[in-house]
Image (spheres, rainbow, N blue to C red):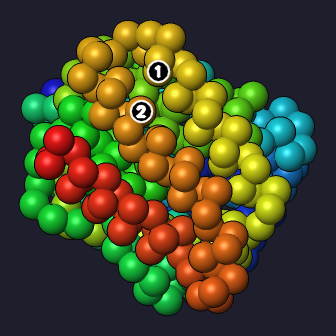
Amino acid sequence: MDRTVAIVMPAYRAEETIAASVASVISQTFADWQLWIVADDGADYEAFLARAGLADSRLRFLDSGGTRRGASLARNVALDAIDTPYAAILDADDRMQPEKLARVISALDTHGIVSTALDVMTLDFSHLRYVGTGPDRVLTPGEHKWVSISMDSMIAWDRRKADGRYDAGMSNMTDLEFLLQLYRTVPVSMHLGTPLHDYVKRDGSMSNARNVAAGMIASKREILSRLESGHYGLPQADVEGLAAFLAVSLEAEERYEAAAAKTPGLLFEDHLEPMLAVARLTTAAS
């Protein structure tokens, strides 16, 4: 049985980080993979990686067709080209832990979507915090964000059961929007609570600069509007669970600037998590 997984990696000015990302894939204990690197800057990443000693027949190289067209469009270029049964996402500044693919592919034998917990790190791979740790568990769409409270780029999925393309017109939250597309035909996902994915939080997202916050707010409102209009065809209970999460997250966005002024360096996740805990208690008491 074909169990090949195509890993999609958009790359824009990624020379500083891409070698570590690609090396993490080459080091996987599961060997049946293809890594599709889509240059969004005209760079010759094949030659660049070869000079770093990272030449492998499983590496594939594409071009986005322009410069700075965006990660969503670059991902879609690869998604239109691959023909494997499984797909996964890896950004050019993130890393997979060596056993990630083996664990994920095993879970994909029985579930159409698999997510994993994250080790959130700085650009030099210094640990900041974990997201989504705990027991492995089956999650509905309405439960997912209450467990994996931020960043959804760690997913893998069975392309025979679910398909989607990234919304290139959305400035932020495209990972969540894509995941909701997959949930249209896969009613539950498997979440692996071990942090198998190193997620780099860049300075712009760490500080949540004013333009970043504005984009986040606009995108969250757009996803909320789509949910409430039935755009994803999800059961009402899942719509309500996601809407409740987004409502808290939007409130957190509005309050984050003041909170970060009081606590310099405050991660948005550390700001959001206590608000979600209060919302859970309120819901449980009602």
- Answer left or right for 7 relative to 49: left
**The one of 99 and 275 positioned closer to us in this rendering:** 275
Neighbours of disc 2 within 10 Å: few (<14), some (14-19), many (20+): many
Tag 2: residue type?
Answer: Ala
Q: Quick check: marks 2 and 1 in contact, CB under 8 Å? A: yes
Q: Residue furthest front?
A: 286
The residue at the point 50 percent across, 11 percent down is 229
- Answer left or right for 129 relative to 78: left
Quarter of the image for residue 79 reads top right
Quarter of the image for residue 174 reads top right
Tag 1: residue type?
Answer: Leu
The residue at the point 62 percent across, 67 percent down is 256
- Answer left or right for 13 relative to 140: right
Is residue 97 positioned above or below 101 on the image? below
Q: Quadrant of the N terminus?
A: top left
Question: Percent position (x, y) of residue 177?
Answer: 52, 32
The residue at the point 56 percent across, 22 percent down is 225
User: Which residue corresponds to mark 1?
Assistant: 227
User: Which residue corresponds to mark 2?
Assistant: 243
Neighbours of disc 1 within 10 Å: few (<14), some (14-19), many (20+): many
Quarter of the image for residue 277 reads bottom left
Secondary element at image label 2: helix
**The one of 49 and 7 positioned closer to us in this rendering:** 7
**Looking at the image, can residue 23 be seen?**
no
Question: Percent position (x, y) of residue 57?
Answer: 50, 51
The residue at the point 35 percent across, 57 percent down is 276
Question: Percent position (x, y) of residue 18?
Answer: 63, 67
Mark 2 to mark 1: distance in Å?
7 Å
Question: Percent position (x, y) of residue 52?
Answer: 65, 77
**Looking at the image, can residue 226 be seen?**
yes
Is residue 136 positioned above or below 26 on the image? above
The image's mark for residue 34 is: none
